[in-house]
């Protein structure tokens, strides 16, 4: 979810060639300011900055995307969905926007549409393995989401983390709004050292149920990791990896029937 690094470079090059370059630079400045405000927890001010960028460039996909992220964190799912739709209109090939559209739809209980968006993200080559959940087998619907969740927990406790993730994916295919499945998938991903994907799972869990923002995942909602979620930050990932390792030193045992 990073801003294309060429954006600022291109705007600088265009100062020689194009009279509109100044406007593009200003757009980027508003986006940068919005990210900074977001990292400070100033969500309303952050949205205002992204809207300033949008006013200057209504087709700026990153501004719409980042606005959608902030709105989602405020649990304004309808508004978030609209922002992700606008990001997709501006850049139909943005797998992250499609994936987050699916997340907003799932939060609104629109499971079928959410699965379509997740599938589209997968087709576009999203690096987030959650985006392929809608293509997993569900044994012709004979197994419930809770059944898959319990199976995943058993596999996790046996140290079979990859198999556990597959079970959680099946649970999420049937119920994308299951915060426990997102949380436990995050634990399994962390065990495999896939901290970036784990962070996304924890965000999903806390977005669906604020009660899942436990101390074990607090690193995922501090200011540095907030910056990473927006399109535009380069240094938060290494910090996030270090924090995730520290916060997961203790063994986690999952109740297979919780």
Image (spheres, rainbow, N blue to C red):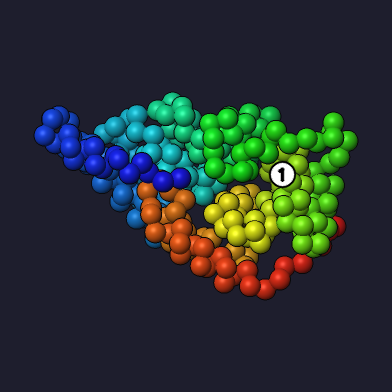
**Residue at 39%, 59% in the rendered image:** 235
Crowding near the residue tagged with mark 1, few <14, some 14–19, many ≥20 C-alpha atoms within 10 Å:
many
Which of the 4 image quarters holds residue 113? top right
Toward the viewer: 73 or 100?
Answer: 100
Using the image as rendered, state which of residue 129 and residue 220 is in the foreground: 129
Q: In the image, is 185 to the left or to the right of 254?
A: left
| Residue sitting at x 38%, y 54% | 234
Question: Does residue 181 lie above or below 93 as drawn?
Answer: below
- Outermost residue, right side: 142
- Location of residue 247 in the rendering, given as x and y in whole percent from the top left corner: 59, 70
Along the viewing direction, whichever of 140 and 218 lies nearer the viewer: 140
Figure quadrant of residue 57: top left
Residue farthest toward the left in the current orientation of the protein: 16
Left or right of residue 175: residue 43: left
How many discs appear? Answer: 1
Can residue 56 be seen here? The reply is yes
| Residue 127 drawn at (x, y percent) | 54, 42
Q: Residue at x 61, y 39 (%)?
A: 131
Residue 16 image position (x, y, % from top left): 11, 34
Q: Give the quarter of the figure containing the C terminus.
A: bottom right
The answer to whether residue 175 shows anywhere in this view is no
Q: Residue at the spot x=85%, y=47% of the render?
A: 147
Residue 105 position in % (x across, y down): 61, 35
On screen, 69 above or below 180? above
Q: Which residue is mark 1?
A: 169
For label 1, the SS is: helix
Q: Does residue 40 sit above or below 65 in this rendering?
A: below
Seen in the image, is 146 located left or right of residue 172?
right
In this view, the residue in front, 104 or 217, is 217
């Amino acid at each position: 979810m990073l801003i294309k690094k060429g954006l600022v470079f291109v705007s600088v090059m265009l100062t020689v060639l194009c009279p509109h370059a100044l406007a593009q630079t200003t757009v980027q400045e508003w986006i940068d300011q919005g990210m900074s405000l977001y990292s400070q927890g100033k969500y309303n001010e952050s949205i205002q900055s992204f809207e300033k960028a949008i006013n200057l460039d209504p087709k700026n996909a990153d501004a719409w995307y980042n606005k959608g992220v902030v709105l989602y964190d405020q649990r304004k799912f309808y508004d978030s969905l609209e922002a992700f739709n606008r990001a997709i209109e501006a850049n139909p090939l943005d797998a992250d926007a499609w994936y987050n559209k699916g997340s907003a739809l799932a939060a609104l209980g629109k499971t079928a549409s959410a699965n379509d968006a997740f599938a589209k993200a997968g087709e576009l080559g999203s690096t987030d393995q959650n985006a392929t959940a809608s293509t997993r087998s569900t044994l012709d619907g004979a197994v419930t989401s809770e059944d898959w969740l319990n199976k995943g927990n058993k596999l996790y406790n046996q140290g079979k983390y990859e198999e556990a993730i597959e079970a959680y994916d099946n649970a999420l295919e049937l119920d994308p709004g299951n915060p426990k499945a997102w949380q436990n998938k995050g634990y399994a991903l962390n065990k495999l050292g896939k901290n970036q994907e784990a962070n996304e799972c924890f965000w999903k869990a806390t977005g669906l149920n604020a009660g899942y923002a436990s101390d074990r995942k607090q690193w995922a909602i501090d200011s540095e990791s907030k910056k990473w979620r927006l399109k535009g930050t380069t240094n938060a990932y290494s910090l996030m990896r270090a924090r995730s390792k520290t916060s997961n030193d203790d063994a986690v045992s999952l109740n297979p029937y919780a």
